[in-house]
């Protein structure tokens, strides 16, 4: 929000200096981003009129001007501005005046005397325009000081407003906060109803329900729209960052900046009537004021004229019904639109407007009547005309109601930690424009309709705290005993997982929790999605159901930038719809992806590509932190390579998957080299059993090695499970130490060699005990998997 300091002081008189005012605004939550001083040191600059302008005899780009400076007489000025011409009224810096770093002196330019300087707005420090002389109104008082004529000196303040302070998108809203903080009172706006002087009206119809519950309009006939915008209005607009366009447009902009209520003006002669508000229909289009053709659907609200769209409600009017200098009858509108009906619509069209910015955050539903009356008075005072009666269509049940909140004295003191006098609390609340009724235990406060951010008791406590001053709240240490909570030993800290992956060459990625639905469709992960009601963009429209799509997308972007070896991991939440009316399910997960060379380039090793088994080793290293025993079972999710993928299980439950990416997916992502990835529930790697101490056996262990011939289709995991179950309690460890395929082993089979380490805690095992275990394992493996001892 950008505004003129002098304009604000008109609404809330205060003795605070400019610097103090800026500091106060920031302290109460209206952060001042920039203060630009305007028009200082212009004591010797006058309003002057060029009487004649002749070409300089020695320079093609210079003109010798005779300038009427009023009481200062007729002066000769040599000027090089392209817009210097007879009759132009412009600023004149007289001899002895300092403009910027230049002190004006009598001089000869190419042999011709010059007794002053005609100035541009940039030279005077009041605008950035340096294209020519600052053109003043023809009725400007020649010879008068420029500063007085333009209302200088002044300054522009630019505020960085938080989304909850929509009321401060108007000078009046800011004035209430300044009055409360600086001890003043907001001046009466003096907006009295303007009586009708004619009978012209336009019927208004509401067809959008709660999205547009109030719409007011007024016809003003006999308007001289060609009149120039008054200097005081144009300057206030310019200092607020708005370029003056034409009188009727400028009036609506002026009212919006002062009150916070967006308005629009239509040429009544171009309307057929009645005017209404409804949802747009699929296939409709509208040419906007800026000339662009907007394609509409039922997500937009439109203002209609005899059912044809003539304006994009809450955003921008239409080109075909715009006001011009030839307009003689104007139809002014002021409406209230629900924020939910406007928010995000402008972004869909690549459109950002001041009106949309305000309606998205919420505009006072009681403002339209005041805005219509104020705009009517301005039009009549400047351009004349005969106003008709105000036409209003309203759905009272759909309008926001004033909120009544109870503020308890004890609660205020407890939260702030300081006692604030009742009189000061009441002064602050009343200065902010709130209705206050004192009670035995506190106050009953009625929030005005412009303050959408006030709903509960804590909101009022915040208001009192920020105006009273956070610096005035004492710093105290909390009292009472503190309870130290140590981390649970049943859970591996996430930082340990991060350190382990970083130690294995992975970099942590942090991606958005929302992704492109089209990307999820490639992964065939587009079921039970959680869409965002107000996405940042169409590419970030749904909450992520998995980590891998975003993580692999990040890997692809790195690979596209000539990164030959990329290893990334991410720990975060994924989201899944839980059914109608239920909150989405959130699940913490961990994922990693790798592509390129398996190791860093060096002369002592042959380069090779990272593969499934490299990533499986990294995953098992993570599992070792918690002592988890992971199992791997052949299975390929939709995103995985059919022959290089496995489900990951813990305690018999599927907790994730590990795989090489499907070739079709790699091609779609334009990856030059295969990528391997895993994604698991985080709890599967962080949950751990507490170790239990037990005495070491005093008796020696015995090892027996067995080599079995089994079919290629039998996995080590299956053999391991069968052998462990058959070996009984004396088995301490089962090791796989060799797998052989080749000469001596028939096609379709493999040799698997395992070592059984046996030990008893109460005695030394004898050969008979060991032979019994070996026989049990041999029989079980033969029965379950058709295995035989290799000869």
Image: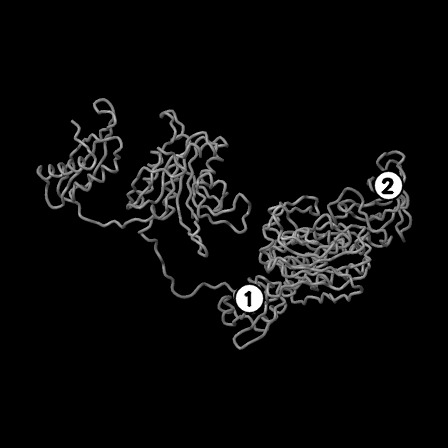
Query: Which residue shows up at 68% across the image and 43% down it?
Result: 292
| Numbered badge on residue 373 | none
**Residue 472 appears in the rendering:** no
The quadrant holding residue 787 is: top left
Query: Which residue shows up at 54% across the image and 48% down it?
Result: 535
Residue 165 in the image, given as x and y percentages of width and height? 60, 58
Task: Name which of mark 1 and mark 2 comes first in the sequence.
Answer: 2
Residue 234 in the image, given as x and y percentages of width and height? 76, 53
Nearer to us in this view, 750 or 296: 296
Quadrant containing the C terminus is top left
Q: Is residue 749 left or right of residue 99?
A: left
Residue 102 in the image, given as x and y percentages of width and height? 78, 44
Q: Is residue 356 left or right of residue 59?
A: left
- Mark 1 or 2, closer to the camera: 1
Query: Which residue shows up at 49% across the image and 35% down it?
Result: 557
Nearer to us in this view, 319 or 62: 319
Which residue is labeled 1 in the image? 460
| Numbered badge on residue 78 | 2
Local crowd size for mark 2, using a 10 Å CA cut-off: few (<14), some (14–19), many (≥20): many
């Amino acid at each position: 929000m950008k505004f003129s300091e002098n304009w604000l002081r008109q609404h809330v008189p205060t003795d605070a200096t400019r610097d103090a005012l800026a500091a106060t605004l920031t302290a109460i939550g209206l952060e001042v981003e920039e203060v630009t001083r305007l028009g200082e040191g212009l004591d010797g600059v006058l309003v002057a009129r060029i009487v004649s302008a002749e070409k300089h005899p020695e320079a093609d780009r210079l003109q010798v001007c005779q300038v009427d400076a009023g009481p200062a007489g007729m002066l000769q000025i040599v000027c090089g501005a392209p817009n210097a011409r007879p009759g132009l009224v412009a600023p004149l810096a007289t001899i002895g005046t300092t403009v910027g770093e230049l002190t004006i002196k009598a001089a000869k330019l190419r042999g011709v005397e010059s007794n002053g300087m005609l100035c541009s707005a940039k030279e005077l420090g009041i605008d950035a325009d340096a294209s020519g002389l600052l053109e003043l109104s023809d009725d400007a008082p020649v010879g008068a000081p420029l500063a007085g004529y333009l209302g200088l000196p002044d300054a522009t303040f630019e505020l960085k407003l938080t989304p909850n302070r929509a009321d401060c998108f108007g000078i009046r809203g800011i004035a209430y906060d300044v009055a409360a903080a600086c001890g003043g009172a907001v001046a009466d706006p003096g907006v009295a109803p303007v009586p009708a002087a004619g009978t012209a009206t336009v019927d208004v119809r509401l067809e959008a329900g709660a999205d547009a519950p109030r719409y007011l309009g007024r016809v003003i006939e006999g308007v001289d729209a060609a009149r120039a915008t008054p200097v005081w209005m144009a300057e206030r607009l310019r200092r607020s960052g708005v370029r003056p366009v034409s009188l009727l447009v400028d009036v609506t902009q002026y009212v919006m900046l002062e009150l916070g209520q967006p308005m629009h003006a239509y040429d009544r002669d171009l309307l057929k009537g009645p005017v209404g508000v409804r949802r747009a229909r699929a296939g409709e289009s509208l040419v906007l004021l800026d000339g662009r053709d907007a394609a509409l659907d039922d997500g937009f609200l439109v203002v209609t004229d005899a059912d044809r769209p003539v304006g994009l409600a809450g955003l921008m009017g239409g080109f075909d019904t715009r006001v011009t200098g030839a307009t003689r009858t104007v139809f002014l509108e002021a409406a209230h639109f629900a924020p939910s009906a406007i928010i995000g619509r402008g972004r869909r069209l690549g459109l950002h407007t001041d009106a949309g910015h305000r309606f998205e955050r919420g505009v006072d539903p009681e403002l339209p009547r005041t805005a219509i009356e104020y705009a009517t008075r301005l039009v009549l005072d400047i351009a004349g005309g005969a106003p008709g009666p105000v036409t209003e269509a309203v759905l009272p049940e759909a309008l926001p109601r004033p909120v009544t909140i109870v503020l308890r004295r004890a609660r205020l003191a407890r939260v702030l930690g300081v006692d604030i006098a009742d009189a000061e609390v009441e002064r602050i609340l009343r200065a902010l424009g709130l209705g206050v009724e004192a009670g035995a235990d506190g106050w009953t406060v009625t929030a005005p309709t412009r303050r959408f951010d006030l709903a509960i008791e804590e909101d009022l406590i915040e208001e009192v705290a920020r105006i009273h001053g956070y610096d005035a709240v004492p710093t105290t240490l909390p009292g009472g005993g503190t309870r130290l909570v140590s981390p649970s030993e049943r859970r591996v800290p996430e930082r340990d997982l991060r350190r382990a992956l970083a130690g294995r060459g992975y970099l942590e990625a942090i991606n958005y929790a929302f992704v492109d639905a089209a990307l999820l469709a490639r992964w065939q992960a587009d079921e039970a999605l959680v869409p965002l009601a107000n996405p940042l963009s169409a590419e970030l429209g749904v909450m992520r159901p998995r980590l891998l799509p975003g993580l692999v997308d990040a890997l692809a972007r790195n690979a596209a930038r000539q990164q030959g070896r990329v290893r990334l991991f991410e720990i975060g939440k994924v989201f899944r719809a839980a059914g109608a009316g239920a909150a989405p399910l959130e699940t913490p997960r961990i994922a990693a992806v790798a592509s390129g060379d398996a190791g860093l380039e060096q002369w002592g090793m042959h380069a090779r590509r990272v593969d499934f088994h490299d990533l499986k080793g990294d995953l098992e290293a993570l599992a070792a932190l918690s002592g988890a025993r992971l199992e791997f079972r052949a299975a390929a999710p939709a995103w995985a390579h059919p022959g290089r993928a496995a489900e990951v299980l813990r305690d018999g439950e599927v907790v994730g998957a590990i795989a090489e990416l499907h070739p079709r997916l790699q091609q779609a992502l334009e990856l030059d080299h295969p990528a391997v990835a895993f994604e698991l529930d985080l709890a599967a790697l962080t949950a751990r059993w507490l170790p239990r101490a037990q005495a070491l056996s005093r008796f020696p262990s015995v090892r027996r090695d067995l080599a079995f011939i089994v079919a290629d289709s039998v996995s080590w995991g299956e053999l391991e499970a069968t052998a462990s179950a058959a070996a009984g309690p004396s088995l301490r460890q089962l090791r796989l130490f060799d797998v052989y395929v080749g000469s001596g082993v028939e096609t379709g089979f493999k040799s698997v060699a395992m070592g059984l380490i046996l030990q008893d805690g109460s005695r030394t095992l004898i050969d008979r005990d060991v032979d019994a275990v070996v026989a049990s394992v041999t029989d079980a493996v033969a029965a379950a998997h058709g295995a035989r001892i290799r000869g």
